[in-house]
Image (spheres, helix red, strand yellow):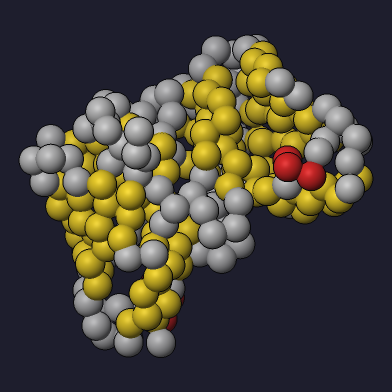
Amino acid sequence: TQLLEQSPQFLSIQEGENLTVYCNSSSVFSSLQWYRQEPGEGPVLLVTVVTGGEVKKLKRLTFQFGDARKDSSLHITAAQPGDTGLYLCAGANSGYALNFGKGTSLLVTP
Amino acid sequence: DAGVTQSPTHLIKTRGQQVTLRCSPKSGHDTVSWYQQALGQGPQFIFQYYEEEERQRGNFPDRFSGHQFPNYSSELNVNALLLGDSALYLCASSLAGGFYGYTFGSGTRLTVV
């Protein structure tokens, strides 16, 4: 069961454009993690947010955790071809399991 | 510093057979989790091992079993393989519960024919 809904499912943009990916749930999470996965590889952790309203920046990537800790967004400024990949959000609540969304597949063309 | 190592990278098995997948966690990590990722889906939690015990289990049948060794490495065993078990199996390691994130391996691609 996917508790996290990600949108859009697919995104194809040109280099230099900005984009936002959304991750929504009806459940409250104690922490939310964002990963990027490339074909044939495992997910790589980008960031973990734990406090409602928290904003974290990682170079051109900005992550926000909703005030109610039910949703999150990832904004990329001036996308580059190297940003291409599958972006996955994953929430942790009780226990140790991560609940993943289906992901947003991003393609950035030169 | 080696990350998470999984073997084999690819595997083809026949329906009804059994398979064992292996994982060595990142140095310094003591917890290993296993996930199944079907094509076009996000990873689904199978179980987590800590101190050689299964600490939490996801919604998978008991055909899926695991083990953690004293050196923290882990195995995932799947019995009576079904076509639907074809997927990428990911191992993730962490220190303690992984609240702040996991390090994933590159996975084992299992194809059941």
Answer whether residue A28 is visible to the viewer in this image: no
Reply above or below: A69 against A80. above
Reply above or below: B41 against A100. below
Q: Residue at x 91, y 36 (%)?
A: A17
The x, y position of residue B94, in whole percent, is: 32, 32
The x, y position of residue A30, in whole percent, is: 46, 22
The x, y position of residue B58, in whole percent, is: 33, 50
Q: Is residue B100 left or right of residue A12?
A: left
Reply above or below: B51 against A60. below
Q: Is residue B61 left or right of residue A62?
A: left
The x, y position of residue A26, in whole percent, is: 59, 34
Q: Quadrant of residue A80?
A: top right
Q: Residue at x 72, y 35 (%)?
A: A22
Q: Quadrant of residue B13?
A: bottom left
| Pick the front one: B9 or B69 | B9
Q: Is residue B40 left or right of residue B12?
A: right
Q: Residue at x 64, y 28 (%)?
A: A71
Q: Is residue A86 left or right of residue B71?
A: right
Answer whether residue A34 is visible to the viewer in this image: yes
For the image, the number of numbered tags is 0
Reply above or below: A15 against A31. below
- From this viewpoint, which residue is outermost toward the front? B1
Q: Residue at x 19, y 46 (%)?
A: B73
| Pick the front one: B104 or A82 | A82
